[in-house]
Image (cartoon, grey):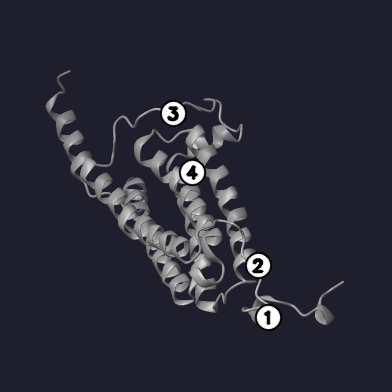
Amino acid sequence: MKLPSPAKTALRNVTSAPLPAYARRTLGVDTATRRWLIGGVMPLWLGAGLVDWWCHRRTHIEDNSGAHESAIHALMMAEAGVPVVLGLFCEVNAGVLAVSGGALGVHAATAAWDVSYAEERRRVTPFEQHCHSLLEVVPLMATGFLAVLHWDQARALLGRDVTGADLRLRPKRPDPLSWRSRALLLGAMGVFGGLPYAEEMVRCLRARRTLRRRPPAPEPPTRTLTVPDDQAIR
């Protein structure tokens, strides 16, 4: 449709005028959130996991809690990795958000199991406990960012949106993330997440070839996590 000259001039003035600050922030929220999720949250998760692996190595996990605890670590990595893979390759809808929320709950329960087993067999230092805090919070951050980016499906999952919850798994179309970025992210997960914990499992199995629970130490290695019987609240 052809516009008369005055209308063309007005349209050009509107589209070329500088946007107010609040409008620029609103338009850039989606891109900024994705960049922070990929460039901030994921490196934070991988970095905390790598430092946690170093803490296990420093306390000689192979000689005390053994491969049983290392298997728990592998389970937690799988629980956190499933939402990441779905978010990379699938359209984020109510189904993906439901899986992410479920994995988040299971991951938190497994983390509690991990510490309750480890603290009776090796020293869990305050530094390692802070690493655990990050490893528990970062999946919550990632799930929250996904829900914010796809708030309509988050509302639908809670029954608050008229569009209905989409529970189907579909590939991303269009895909905002390039294949190069996806490959780099998966490679970083393998190098900084998978390899260190695979080395830990191999080291534990070399020391004792079993996944069974080790008996607790005669004296609690982590006294800060143990309350004496005479001080326990009844």
In the image, farthest residue toward the right? 234
Q: Are marks 4 and 1 in contact (CB under 8 Å)?
A: no
Mark 3 residue type = Leu
Q: Which residue is identified by label 4?
A: 147
Residue 170 in the image: above or below residue 201:
above
Q: How many numbered marks are there?
A: 4
Mark 2 residue type = Pro
For residue 67, side relative to residue 200 (left or right): right
Q: CA distance from mark 4 to mark 1?
A: 45 Å
Within 10 Å of disc 3 (Cα), the crowding (few <14, some 14-19, many 20+) is some
- Nearest to viewer (mark 1 / mark 2): 2
Q: Which residue is identified by label 2?
A: 215
Q: Residue 225 or 182: which is nearer the viewer?
A: 225
From the top left corner, tell me how far across and down residue 52 is, in percent.
45, 68
Q: Which residue is identified by label 3?
A: 169
Residue at image position (16%, 23%) is 3
In the image, farthest residue toward the top? 1
For residue 207, side relative to residue 110 (left or right): left
Residue at image position (42%, 63%) is 200
Within 10 Å of disc 4 (Cα), the crowding (few <14, some 14-19, many 20+) is many
Q: Residue 198 or 85: which is nearer the viewer?
A: 198
Q: CA distance from mark 2 to mark 3?
A: 43 Å
Q: Earlier in the sequence, mark 2 or mark 3?
A: 3
From the top left corner, tell me how far across and down residue 53 is, in percent.
43, 67
Question: For residue 227, what is the image quadrant?
Answer: bottom right
- Nearest to viewer (mark 3 / mark 4): 3
Quadrant where the C terminus sits is: bottom right
Mark 4 residue type = Ala
Q: Are marks 2 and 3 in contact (CB under 8 Å)?
A: no
Q: Which residue is identified by label 1?
A: 219
Within 10 Å of disc 2 (Cα), the crowding (few <14, some 14-19, many 20+) is few
Residue at image position (14%, 24%) is 4
